Amino acid sequence: MDTIGNFNMRDNDSQEPSILTSSFFLDHVGEVFLTLKPDELSWKLMESLCNDEEDRSTCLGMQFLSKHVTSINISDVYAVEFIDWGLVHETLLTNPGILLGHASEMYRFTVHGVERSRSQPSLWAPTVFTFGHADKQICQMWVNMINSYLSLETDRPKNLLVYVNPGSGKGNGCRIWESVAPIFSQAKVKTKVIVTERAGQAFDAMVSITNRELNLYDGIVAIGGDGFFNEILNGILLSRHRAPYPPSPPDEDPTVETESDVLLHDPTITIVDPMVSNDDESPLLKRSTLDESQAVNLNQDSEMSFPNERFRFGLIPSGSTDAIVICTTGVRDPMTSALHIILGKRVCLDIAQVVRWEKSHVSKNKPHVRYAASFAGYGFYGDVITESEKYRWMGPKRYDYAGTKVFLRHRSYEAKVAYMKVESEKTNMGANVRRIKAFWGLSKDSERVVCRAKCDICNMTSVAQQREKPDPKQESNWVRVKGRFLSIGAAVISCRNEKAPDGLVVDAHLSDGFLHLVLIKDCPRAFYLWHLTQLARKGGTPLNFDFVEHHKTTCFTFTSSGEESVWNVDGEILQAQKLSAQVFRGLISLYYNSLPPVAKTYATICFLTSLGRHLQLYSPRIIALSYGDVFKHFQIWRLITNFIFIGSFSFTFAFRLFIILKYGVQLERVPFDKRTADYVWMFFFGAFSLLAIAAIPFLWSPFMGASLVFMIVYVWSRELPNIRINIYGLVELKGFYLPWTMLVIDLMLGNPLMPSLLGIGVGHLYYFLTVLHPLAGGTNFCKTPFWVHKLVMHWGQGFQMNSPVTQEASTGVAFQGRSYRVGGTSSGSTRYPPNAGAFSGMSRRIRGH
Ligand SMILES: Nc1ncnc2c1ncn2[C@@H]1O[C@H](COP(=O)(O)OP(=O)(O)OP(=O)(O)O)[C@@H](O)[C@H]1O
């Protein structure tokens, strides 16, 4: 075999940058020309399969790999391994007329990746390619190279805690885990697996596990149904999520007579935005809200709070309904979910906090908190779950049987519901949102757009919602409904499942920040049946009835009067005569393969530019910033290329690349989450400003990439000032001081300070114009232009919607430094953290007295 094994920066055919090319034998295919780029592994068959020059993928009626380029993205590869000497088979029909191919022995390596089904792209399966070569070292070099690119996929889990419910669904939790476990080992993901022996075991374990122990894992995976996931979710959140109780109408505030008021009135309590803080300084969720057994973890080491950027949840379906999995991956398939977890980045999920208020000897209303990731329903939904528990032995069929029984009973319940009025997306959206929506072709019938990761509707809704935060203190913001209801449901997600293919509420999106309240008033049985049949039909209109009310809201309260049903919270029973609920937008992250594209692309381009320089493929002089050449010789590219060279291969280069991969990625994930256009604009703004500065002769520098990188550090330090960082294992400090610490290190190492100072200056200008000035009541002069949105849309990566800084935006803590005081004197500057609904509820109670 002719080994090329050379390094090229250009592939002759594609004219795109490539890194490594060589010829190999691909098992069951034949001799291929393999090319490795940082983001892709591709190969081309060396010989024609049927002596046919055209692009054909079939021959004699049999399906073959096309002789044209076939490829797999590195982001879809989860393992590569050297497998030593062995057989590599040629394909049948390599030579026409020879029906049986033969096998040759050689050294081999395998690439394990993900293959998407052509007919159903959300269905994923593992795939493996075996490449053979006579030279062992060449195989090993390829393995090392692919591994080094895989190591750039920094967010893949390395260590997971796995809980298996052996009894979920048809009782095959263990078998399902056994079927997916090998791919975790192949991907070198360590797993600690616990098979539960009783209901509630996972909940107890989550409550009692210390944060230190939990922090050893990148996430927790449940093998089970929605109910089991709910158990784990509650175990984690009940002891770690700090938030006040849901707001309620002024005359029905159940919290006013609770012990918690003592705490909430204490003006010395400092609240820290849980989004950005690792500190446990905000014990808003009182110990009293937990059982004694649940509270054990509260005062332990407390670096874990929610929302949490790092820690993720995974769910591999083996339950009876599996609505959460269907709504997130799009398919109820354990292997697909496992592959999402292994390759995984994240998708944010809204979580509802449901509080039951019960009378106790200590106070009139004692709260009991539960969290729900998919649904909370009363009446029909509660009765079905109660009834179905009696027939658990039937497996998933129990829901059909119990559903029929409950339907025939046709019970309705007297209740009062009050929900916070939130203007509908359609009527309330601003001109900009409307324009973008029209631009996307979503102006008509947007409700029927099925939610998936990077969902535009979620973002648009959230923008609309951010602009309209009704004050829960004002009576006029509450709508009250009283009467007899067959059911009351609050959907956090659409709850699609096999029985309701479009879900209970088709336009409930994964992270839209809404509870979708569905009130079904008492009606004749035949009408209710009609509603249920619409639910069961794809494209049905179950909400299109006079007796059905659908309201998007952020919180609601419920009081039953008379005969009572129970609440069904993610498939678990909760008895409540009085209940209030609110939603927390994007409170948890689920493993989902969506990459933060901007920082990764910038890091890759910088790496390739320096590699090209290292291989002496070009001279740095032709990419440097020189206004003379730009204007006299129209060498426009210099305006861009000077930003992509961040140094020759050296410690300084590695450090700058590390900054982009760590702080750039984190910035994109947290404050710029779902704001890809804003993030791209930040880079453009920095580049334009630095180009303007470079026009001043003594501030000119041939390469301004270092300043752009420092700008990332500065903006990161303002957006995430509370994150603790460790400098070379010597000093631990808060993120706010990072740029200044780096400046001191530069000074000590004798590096020039000018690039860093320019980066700080431009970073501050950006932060001032986009955050500080608008927050002080000024106009945002630096809004992301529409052409950047268009650019991001054409790029097809990331989230294409802007969410401008508002009083409630997630950058609040950054504005104030690090924290703010409830009831403190500096009310003028008090801003609310992202889950502002919750915190506004909090301040309402404080001022209410
Ligand atoms: N070892 C066990 N034995 C019995 N019950 C268990 C065990 N482990 C967990 N459970 C309980 O089983 C209940 C249901 O589990 P799960 O949600 O996995 O299945 P399901 O109800 O069939 O599916 P779905 O919730 O999707 O309808 C949960 O409430 C959980 O607490």
Image (tube, rainbow, N blue to C red):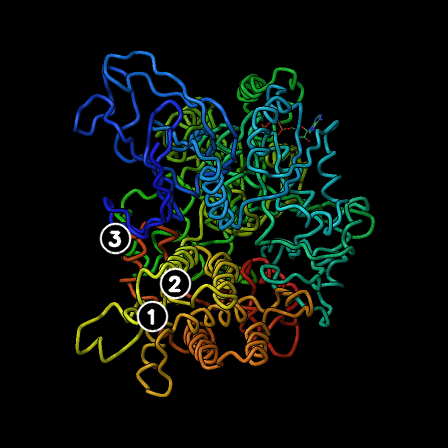
x, y percentage for residue 328? 47, 38
Residue at coordinates 37% horizontally, 16% vertically from top-left? Answer: 102
x, y percentage for residue 325? 51, 34
Which callout, 1 or 3, points to the residue nearer the camera?
1
State the residue position of label 2: 678
Residue 74 position (above or below residue 307): above
Secondary structure beneath label 2: helix
Categorize mark 2 by other alpha carbons within 10 Å: few (<14), some (14-19), many (20+).
many
Q: CA distance from mark 1 to mark 3?
A: 34 Å
Q: Quadrant of residue 244?
A: bottom right
State the residue position of label 1: 642
x, y percentage for residue 468? 44, 61
- Is residue 10 or residue 769 the one in the foreground? 10
Q: Quadrant of residue 316?
A: top right
**Residue 517 visible to the viewer:** no
Residue 340 position (above or below residue 787): above
- Is residue 286 or residue 99 the one in the foreground? 99
Image quadrant holding the C terminus, namely bottom right
Label count reads: 3
x, y percentage for residue 655? 52, 65
Secondary structure beneath label 1: loop
Q: CA distance from mark 1 to mark 2?
A: 22 Å
Disc nearer the start of the sequence (1/2): 1
State the residue position of label 3: 439
Q: Quadrant of residue 640?
A: bottom left
Question: Residue flagged by tag 1: what amino acid is it?
Answer: Asn
- Is residue 567 or residue 548 the one in the foreground? 567
Question: Residue flagged by tag 2: what amino acid is it?
Answer: Asp
